[in-house]
């Protein structure tokens, strides 16, 4: 009688279901990953409102400004003074004027009219409202002259 | 001589290992870069340059609804006024503001639908008032959520009054 050796038949594992699930997972993570809001800074805790619905059509020319506080790991404020965050750069309200002028010149250089550019202000809920007004005033100064402003808020769920 | 059956024995199983490696790399990348961000909306706002003068108001342009917001020492809302009448403080004040604005625009609609679109709200906060109250006031003036979750718009033209000194 012929006896089969132990390694004569290697059982093949069917990989198809696993690959299916992995592709499903990849698709899921790709879809829920929000690439649009890269300019949103985590240090800014936005105020909430029921009517703050995301716009149906994304603005073409928007200049986002994050205005918030440095925060500790637990989310508490690290300093009482608010800053404007541009990526890793951090500016106080007094220091921001040259940056605004630079942005305004950039839009003029690429041929975009300043009345078509919306300045989106992502200000922290705890910021003094006079400072937000001051920031808007700065944006309207001669040599900067932004004209359209939008205040950002997160959508509050309805109870 | 025994001949092998070419059709059945020539089946080559494709090596899936590299593909699975890459797919797992992709999966880990997307999992790590995942940032859960709440949906954000915005409100358009304008801020007139300089102080408003009463002489610019004509019969055709009705004066703006005035929302005055006073702050206490801690930056919280002490009192909310709509066209001079005190609506109190806290969450209830914004609900009252919402119904006052609704009442005012209903009166405007009697004059004409265009008047409602032209009507402005001027928000005049104390310097130290926390910004979240501004958003609450803007939300209350903008409209309300309908029963089916669709917003009912009241006023879309909202502006800041000239800044008060700290």
Image: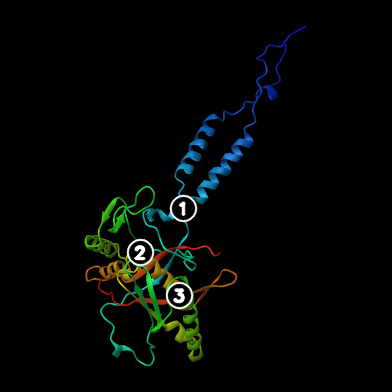
What residue is shown at x 34% (from left), y 69% (from top)? Answer: B129
Find disc 1 in the rendering and name its residue: A34
Q: Residue furthest front?
A: B73
Label 2 to label 1: alpha-carbon separation: 19 Å
Give neighbour class at mark 3: few <14, some 14-19, many 20+ (Cα, 10 Å).
many
Of badges 3 and 1, nearer the viewer stands: 3
For residue B93, which numbered disc appears in the image? Answer: 3
Q: Nearer the viewer, residue A30 or B40?
A: B40
User: Residue B61, image x and y in percent?
Assistant: 38, 88
Which chain is home to disc 1?
Answer: A
Which chain is home to disc 3?
Answer: B
Find disc 2 in the rendering and name its residue: A121
Q: Earlier in the sequence, mark 2 or mark 1?
A: 1
Q: Is residue A12 left or right of residue B155?
A: right
For residue A54, which numbered disc appears in the image? Answer: none
Quadrant housing the N terminus of chain B = top right
Look at the numbered disc 1 and give the secondary structure of its residue: loop
Quadrant housing the C terminus of chain B = bottom left
């Amino acid at each position: 009688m012929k006896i089969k050796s132990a390694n004569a038949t290697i059982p093949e594992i069917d990989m198809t279901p696993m690959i299916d699930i992995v592709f499903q997972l990849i698709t899921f993570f790709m879809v829920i990953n929000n690439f649009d809001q890269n300019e949103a800074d985590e240090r800014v805790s936005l105020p909430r409102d029921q009517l703050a619905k995301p716009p149906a059509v994304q603005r073409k020319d928007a200049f986002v400004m994050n205005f918030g506080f440095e925060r500790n790991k637990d989310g508490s404020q690290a300093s009482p003074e608010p800053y404007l965050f541009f990526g890793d750069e951090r500016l106080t309200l007094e220091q921001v004027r040259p940056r605004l002028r630079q942005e305004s010149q950039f839009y003029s250089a690429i041929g975009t009219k300043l009345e078509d550019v919306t300045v989106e202000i992502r200000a922290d809920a705890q910021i003094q409202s006079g400072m937000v007004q001051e920031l808007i005033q700065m944006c309207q100064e001669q040599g900067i002259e932004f004209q359209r402003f939008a205040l950002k808020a997160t959508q509050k769920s309805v109870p | 001589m025994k001949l092998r059956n070419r059709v059945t024995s020539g089946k080559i199983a494709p090596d899936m290992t590299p593909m699975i490696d890459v797919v797992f790399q992709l999966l880990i990348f997307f999992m790590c870069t995942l940032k859960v961000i709440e949906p954000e909306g915005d409100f358009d706002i304008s801020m007139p340059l300089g102080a408003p003068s009463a002489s610019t108001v004509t019969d055709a342009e009705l004066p703006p609804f005035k929302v005055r917001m006073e702050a206490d020492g801690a930056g919280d809302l002490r009192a909310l006024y709509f066209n001079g009448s005190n609506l109190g403080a806290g969450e209830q004040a914004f609900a009252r503001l919402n119904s006052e604005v609704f009442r005012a625009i209903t009166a405007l609609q009697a004059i004409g639908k265009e008047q409602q679109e032209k009507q402005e709200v001027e928000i005049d906060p104390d310097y130290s008032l926390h910004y979240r109250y501004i958003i609450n006031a803007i939300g209350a003036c903008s409209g309300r959520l309908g029963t089916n979750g669709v917003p009912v718009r009241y006023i879309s033209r909202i502006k800041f009054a000239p800044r008060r000194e700290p």
